[in-house]
Amino acid sequence: MISYHHETKIFKLDTQTTTYMMGIADNKYLGHIYYGKKLEYQDLSYMLRTQEHPFVPSKLSREKLSFLDSFPMEYPFSGTGDFRESCIDIRDKNGQSGLELLYAGHRIYDGKDKLQGLPAVWGEGCQTLEIALEDVCVGVRVLLSYSVFEDSDALMRSVKVENIGTDAVYLERALSACLEMDDEDFEIISLSGAWARERHIKRQPLLSGSFVTESVRGESSHQDHPFLAAVSQNCTQTCGDVYAMHFVYSGNFLAKAQRTQFGSLRMALGIHPDRFCWKLRAGETFQAPEAVLVYSDAGLGKMSRTLHDLYRNHLIRSSYKDKERPVLINNWEATYFDFHTEKLIEIAKQSAALGIEMLVMDDGWFGHRENDDSSLGDWIVNEEKLPGGLKYLVDEVNKLGMKFGIWFEPEMISPDSKLYEKHPDWAFHLKGRMPSRARDQLVLDLSRPEVVDYIYDSISNILHSANIEYVKWDMNRALADIGSDALAPDRQGELSHRYMLAVYELQERLITEFPDLLLENCSSGGARFDPGMLYYSPQIWCSDDTDAIERLMIQEGTQLLYPMSAIGAHVSDCPNHTVGRVTPFETRGITALAGTFGYELDITKISEQERNMVPGQIAAYKKYAPLIREGNYYRIASYRENHKYDCYEIVSKDRSQAAVFFVQVMHEPSVKSRKIKLQGLSEHAVYEVDGRQYTGAALMYAGLLRERMYGDFQAEVIEVHQVSDRTE
Ligand code: GLA
């Protein structure tokens, strides 16, 4: 999969259908040669254009600066002549910054080393190339890692920086990956949004200057997403070129695409350099997180499926990874903070009778929390609300045959809490300044080991006190006023990353001590829906917006990158609590099939008619769950684009069955039936749909017709079964 060709000094990495090539120019500069469709080895070093003006420095030293500013750097450094976006910046003992990172060796090995303290892709059937670049003047070595798997088309990159000098230096920027692309009219795809409107797909041309998508909020965020793709103008779901980068990290990030003066495109991704500064003493190393790269020659659909398979097979680790997730009911939208044991048991009783398998008790069970203005940090059960404590409640729920799950927001502290009374300095704060509250809460200083231990022990004690089988780990505010009394002044720039490392450490400890726990991450809905979190929790709450129509767009953006088994999707009550829209219960059920299914409503209060539909919805979830968990995803139509209807399809890996999820958002009078072209089937196989037989080719190229349904917000699931594998 990985080879080095001495004569030409070319590195070649192959995945199933792609090739990535780098070369060494002038015996020292590592340059990017090619990323695209799989190629046999050939000397493509001419792509480095070292035979053209301004030539390599050994031939034309008077134009070295022009060389540095035009060469397709594999890992660009700054301060010495490359004026484009750089990946690394180091302030040395002289207070100066400027690097020249030159090739110093490489090794190719089977497997893939762990990234210390960080989430990363893992698994068998893998090879890694590690290239060392050095700057002897500053005294740093940079190790670039590239890993490829036998069963995947993705390429994983990460970077480790080592201080090989004798003095401390300050790492002010350490991005994880860069891609140099030639003069083509790429468009940029990113995901952006806001609370309750996360991950909407955005596409735009980039004619000049830069496109930036980023977060400096201490989380991957509602607003932007650590993902960036450059696509050819003709790119659709099924054709065209896609170059995608996705970051396996949950904190601040920068993803930038820059058009250079030569018309080429440089894309870079990594930890956001804003307020980042990591002190590296002699001998110390810094590990930057992993970036996943995908090239697709067959449009966005192929990119999605590559990422879905990679994350399902090589990122998620939970014992629930390949298992059906329990159908849950969460009491948040049912009761908010106003609940007690009897109320929860009543919800559980009615839920159990309908086939719901787990009750999740959301926010408000601890301290004296009656609304969102107190008690975070005091993880002690409120026995006034829950007389008999947690054990009694959980036992009662278990007696009904249901599992029990609980909500925590471990990273936070309320100023109105016993914890804050005792340890006001445990909240992040800038010296002499009162930190800004958000939702009346402050953020714990997780760079302090005693804080991490306190949180861990609090959670672990609660989990040991009763049979709790699920945790919803929430995080409800962005990070600001990031200062710590416990770190030296020249290390304050390390805090945001140290915070993320501590969150990862906490979750690692949790799933190690409780390996069968089902962990679901959440952050005011979906503000921390990212590959980093998937390493710890097999599912993530997608959005606080449970409206069946807004969810079409949120879920489409999420499905672009994530397998559906990771997407928390629930049926909630109407009018919807966020947008006030009223949609049919059936449609809410079908929209929520796009993930881990559950309910977010007061089952004791919905109408008899709706209650009667619950067992049917659960049966549908169970029927499609294996397909949704393991199958291939195809996007057929996007409501976001056409403003009328939405449609996607899941096909089993062996192509023998499929389910098509169709939502007619707007009824259009006097329009004939709608044509839906399926994808991913076997051309010559015969399939049955609605009692009629079609060849796969007919379903894919001619399509199916769907009768117009009466009314807005109507939905259906179309089942496709193979009846024979060949046409007679
Ligand atoms: C966040 C979550 C919700 C709920 C509340 C509780 O907003 O996204 O699902 O848990 O917090 O305060």
Image (spheres, grey):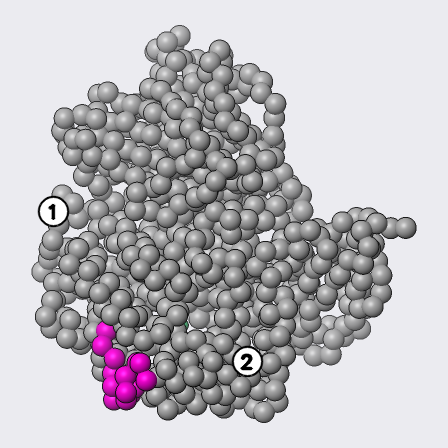
Taking the spot 17% from the left edge, 55% from the top edge, the residue there is 449
| Residue type at tag 2 | Gly
Q: In which quarter of the image is residue 296?
A: top right
Taking the spot 39% from the left edge, 13% from the top edge, the residue there is 27
Ligand 1 positioned in quadrant: bottom left
| Residue type at tag 1 | Pro
Taking the spot 69% from the left edge, 69% from the top edge, the residue there is 717
Give the dominant element type of the magenta stretch: helix, strand or loop: loop
Q: Where is residue 314 in the image (x, y as percent from the top left)?
A: 48, 47
Residue 177 lies left or right of residue 599; in this view the side is: left
Task: Look at the picture and state if 182 lies above or below 415.
Answer: above
Residue 292 lies left or right of residue 726; in this view the side is: left
Q: Are marks 1 and 2 in contact (CB under 8 Å)?
A: no
Of labels 1 and 2, earlier in sequence is: 2
Name the residue nearer the viewer: 152 or 54.
152
Residue 460 lies left or right of residue 13; in this view the side is: left
**Residue 561 visible somewhere in the drawing:** no
Residue under pointer 1: 489
Residue sticking out furthest to the right: 728
Name the residue nearer the viewer: 333 or 318.
318
Q: Residue 715 carries which label?
A: none
Q: Where is residue 642 in the image (x, y as percent from the top left)?
A: 65, 61
- What span is colored magenta in the figure? 379-392
Taking the magenta stretch, the answer to whether it contains residue 153 is no
Q: How crowded is mark 1: few (under 14 residues within 10 Å), some or many (20 or more)?
A: few
Taking the spot 13% from the left edge, 29% from the top edge, the residue there is 167
Task: Look at the picture and state if 116 lies above or below 576.
Answer: above
Taking the magenta stretch, the answer to whether it contains residue 386 is yes
SS type, badge 2: loop
Residue under pointer 2: 355
